[in-house]
């Protein structure tokens, strides 16, 4: 009898991450729809996790992030669940995952809701319409009504600075140089820094005041983030413009001192030229 019992126990399948989450959900009396509403994770992704079909998720990062949020919602030990998820992925559960985005959030449950997304799209449409209405003739010459005033002679080009040898050359703004440092202006700012070969230099959620110095040895360093408006940048200790002033997704943006300096120098050069009389 004992031999039969031992054989039966050995043949029992090992509990996987999806089984652990499903059993905990059923024990709590909650449905998949309720968990989806609480965590803001699509129901189809929760069902894929419970079934162990991690290949149905957009990427490995989503599989780990969604599972972590799911475990928290059920009061499970998220570290234990994530170890089980990684084991499932190592066995082939994520080999055929398809990449659908260059941006992978650290916690997918923080993705804005559908209502906010529609509102943002509508606001952007209104902005585009307003810009076209106000600057339409400048963007598309000839599109606006004709002028009743006589044609004016084109304005003379701004005077160029004279060099010591008597020749004239346009003034150029000096681009900043030195170490590039990013500083988080709020908590949970997800970033991923890579070099030109895709090697990850850093991937984490920065807390407010936390900094990251881009290694000087990194070849063509780049950044992926969804909150460039919450990242202050300095080059050689001097502040430069942010990558964006609004929460937008940025993928593989160059962040070397030369690349960021060029971004800063171009507007400065334009402002210098427009102010020359």
Image (cartoon, rainbow, N blue to C red):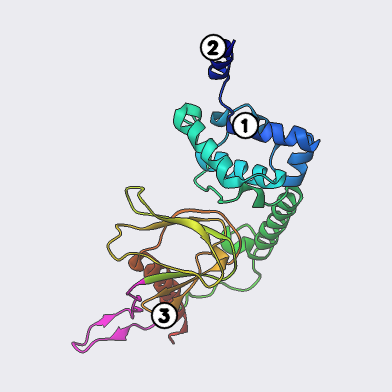
Mark nearer the N terminus (2 vs 1): 2
The residue nearer to you, when weighing 164 against 196, is 196
Q: Verify whether residue 196 appears in magenta.
A: no
SS label for mark 1: helix
From the top left corner, tell me how far across and down residue 244 is, in percent.
54, 64
SS for dot 2 = helix
Residue beneath label 2, please? 3
Q: Which residues are magenta?
A: 157-179
**Corner quadrant of residue 124:** bottom right
* Image vertical order of residue 177 relative to residue 12, above or below: below
> Quick one: label 3 or label 1, which is nearer the N terminus?
1
Q: Residue at x 62, y 42 (%)?
A: 66
Compared to residue 45, the image places residue 9 above or below, namely above
Label 2 crowd (10 A; few <14 / some 14-19 / many >=20): few
Residue 122, image x and y in percent? Answer: 73, 53
The residue singled out by tag 1 in the image is 18
- Residue 211 vs residue 26: left or right? left
Instruction: Residue 62: tell me if it is visible.
Output: no
Relative image position of residue 277 (x, y in whole percent): 44, 87
Residue 208 image label:
none
Residue 4 visible in the picture: yes
Question: Dot 3 lies on which element?
Answer: strand
Disc 3: which residue: 238
Q: Residues within 10 Å of mark 1 (few under 14, many from 20)?
A: many
């Amino acid at each position: 009898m004992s031999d039969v019992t031992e054989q039966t126990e050995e043949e029992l399948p090992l509990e996987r991450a999806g089984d652990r989450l499903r059993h905990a959900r059923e024990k709590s009396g909650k449905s998949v729809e309720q968990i989806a509403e609480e965590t803001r994770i699509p129901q189809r992704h929760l069902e894929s996790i419970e079934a162990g079909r991690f290949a149905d998720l957009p990427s490995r990062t989503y599989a780990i992030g969604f599972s972590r949020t799911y475990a928290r919602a059920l009061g499970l030990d998220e570290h234990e669940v994530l170890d089980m998820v990684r084991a499932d992925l190592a066995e082939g559960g994520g080999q055929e995952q398809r990449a659908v985005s260059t941006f992978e959030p650290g916690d997918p449950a923080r993705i804005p809701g559908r209502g906010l997304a529609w509102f943002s799209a509508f606001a952007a449409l209104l902005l585009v319409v307003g810009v076209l209405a106000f600057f339409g003739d400048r963007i598309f010459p000839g599109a606006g009504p004709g002028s009743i005033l006589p044609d004016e002679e084109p304005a003379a080009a701004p005077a160029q600075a004279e060099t010591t040898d008597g020749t004239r050359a346009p003034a150029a703004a000096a681009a900043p140089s030195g170490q590039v440092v990013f500083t988080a202006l709020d908590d949970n700012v997800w970033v991923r820094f890579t070099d030109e070969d895709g090697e990850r230099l850093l991937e984490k959620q920065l807390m407010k005041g936390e900094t990251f110095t881009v290694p000087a040895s990194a070849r063509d360093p780049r950044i992926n983030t969804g909150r460039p408006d919450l990242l202050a940048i300095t080059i050689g200790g001097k502040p430069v413009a942010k990558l964006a002033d609004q929460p937008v997704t940025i993928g593989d943006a160059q962040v070397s001192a030369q690349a960021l300096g060029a971004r800063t120098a171009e507007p400065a050069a334009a402002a210098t030229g427009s102010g020359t009389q």
